[in-house]
Image: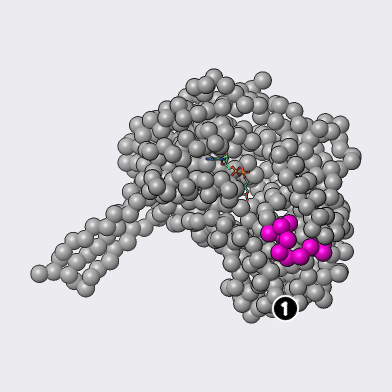
Amino acid sequence: MKQLQNYIDGKFVDPASGSYLDNIEPATGQVYSQVADSDERDVEAAVQAAEQAFPAWSTMPTAERSSLLLALGDKIEANLERLARAESVDNGKPLKLAISLDIPRAATNFRFFATAILHFRSELHTMDLDALNYTLRRPRGVAGIISPWNLPLYLLSWKVAPALATGCTVVAKPSEVTPMTAFLLSELCAEVGLPPGVLNVVHGLGPKAGAAIVRHPRIPTISFTGGTVTGAEIARTAAPMFKKVGLELGGKNPNIIFADADPDQVIRESVRSSFANQGQVCLCGSRILVEESAYATFVDRFIEATRALNIGDPLEEPTDQGALVSKAQLDKVQYYVQLAREEGGNIRCGGSIPDSLPERCQNGYFFQPTVITDLSIDCRVNREEIFGPVVTITPFKTEDEVVEYANATDYGLAASLWTRDLSRAHRVAERIESGTVWINCWMIRDLRVPFGGTKSSGVGREGGEEALRFYTEPKNVCIKIGE
Ligand code: NAD
């Protein structure tokens, strides 16, 4: 069985413990590979390699660093089908989603930051003619990067690319639940000739390998994407060490539909924003809020469109809904559907494990896309992140009421709103507590904008210059020029 080793100092190595964890294919429930079970010894080796690589990497002419990252982007594109298949097997997502979204976006991430760094600006401020102040931005050293399982290569590359572009070296820990594409990325790094130690990938469990990165005294920067509870734990460890920390955490995003919105577009896009990747996208709109006069029609049409989704083997072309990522995730989704029943919800479609699955998938972690109505806005199912194919639909009466509903969670990652009234769209967008608001669309991203969440959805922003600034340390230099 294939064993996914760590990638440290340009070499594939066994973990210090010699132990490996089982890696399960979610669509079958079967172990199909094993992944290094690393601990602080592996993290220490990775940090040493990253430290040794830092002086040369950080002073390499920017254009040369840029070329290497562009080459990595090209390599990912050249291996699109192989990487997409690996991600689909590892994660349970439909292969067509990995081919059309995850892997192309990983290539784009490297290309975007490879070229963004060529245009990165320093600031100069003149104090009349008395003094000039300029700001140098130097890479902060070794960056610790910890990423989740839902968009494994996409989210890992979204952090690794800006870190490397600025001249930082990296110790990365991908999710132990979906380690395969990070392992393949290590192979591609070796193929393009990325210098040893520039990117180190340490696999393993969060509380062991991940925590060892967070508390390592010589990793001054931590970039984390994952759950809010984990983010809080990371913040507790990193704060007294004065680390620079970026946290991209959970969401419970409202999808607001006014009665004047284009009904066909709203149904099509709401099904996508509810159930893409089986609802396991942090940006999914898991709370649909519909203006009262359009509510009944919307619910009927939405349920009809949801029932039409094809659940099946993620590797087969017709499949729209693959498997959830793990047994733990399936259990969590089932728990919340049961809770919805107890909280007075009406399960309008789905709500259980599908009864007809292909032979190969009989033991996989599948769940029907599920639509729930008649829950109060402040019940747990409407406030807590489920991160699965479950949406609630709630009617609202007024603009004020929907703003109150939209903001009635601890999260603040993203929101969508649908209306043809432009003034209202701007008004409501301004009042929603979230890092991103989409108007008449969902999940369109210009990589230059600052991306991230407010409230319990995180602190810090990634994207464009924000990311390049995150991995660099400003130093102000002041020159007196007057008398
Ligand atoms: P998770 O928090 O369980 O794990 C994320 C990563 O952290 C994994 O690599 C894990 O091994 C590691 N980890 C776990 N405990 C750790 C610890 N104590 N110290 C250091 N590292 C630790 O999250 P998950 O289940 O992998 O991902 C799902 C969550 O991620 C959801 O809440 C989702 O909303 C969130 N997410 C957020 C964004 C965003 O951009 N805001 C994007 C994708 C996913």
Residue at numbered disc 1? 398
Q: Which of 474 and 242 is in front in this view?
A: 242
Query: Residue 40 at x, y = what percent?
Result: 46, 30
Neighbour class for label 1 at 10 Å: few (<14), some, many (≥20)?
few
**Which quarter of the frame holds ligand 1?**
top right
Query: Residue 283 at x, y = what percent?
Result: 64, 55
Q: Which of 468 and 219 is in front in this view?
A: 219
Query: Residue 430 at x, y = what percent?
Result: 58, 73
Q: Nearer the viewer, residue 245 or 323?
A: 245
Q: Is residue 322 above or below residue 342?
A: above
Secondary structure, mark 1, is: loop
Image quarter of the N terminus? top right
Q: Can residue 105 be seen from the camera position used here?
A: no
Q: Which residue lies furthest to the right in this view?
A: 356
The number of callouts visible is: 1
Q: What's the residue at 61%, 60% (across, down)?
A: 410
Please, what is the three-letter code of the amino acid marked with disc 1?
Thr
Q: Give the range drawn in magenta.
A: 372-383
Q: What's the residue at 72%, 32% (across, down)?
A: 25
Query: Residue 76 at x, y = what percent?
Result: 57, 38
- Does 382 lie within the magenta span? yes
Q: In which quarter of the image is residue 434?
A: bottom right
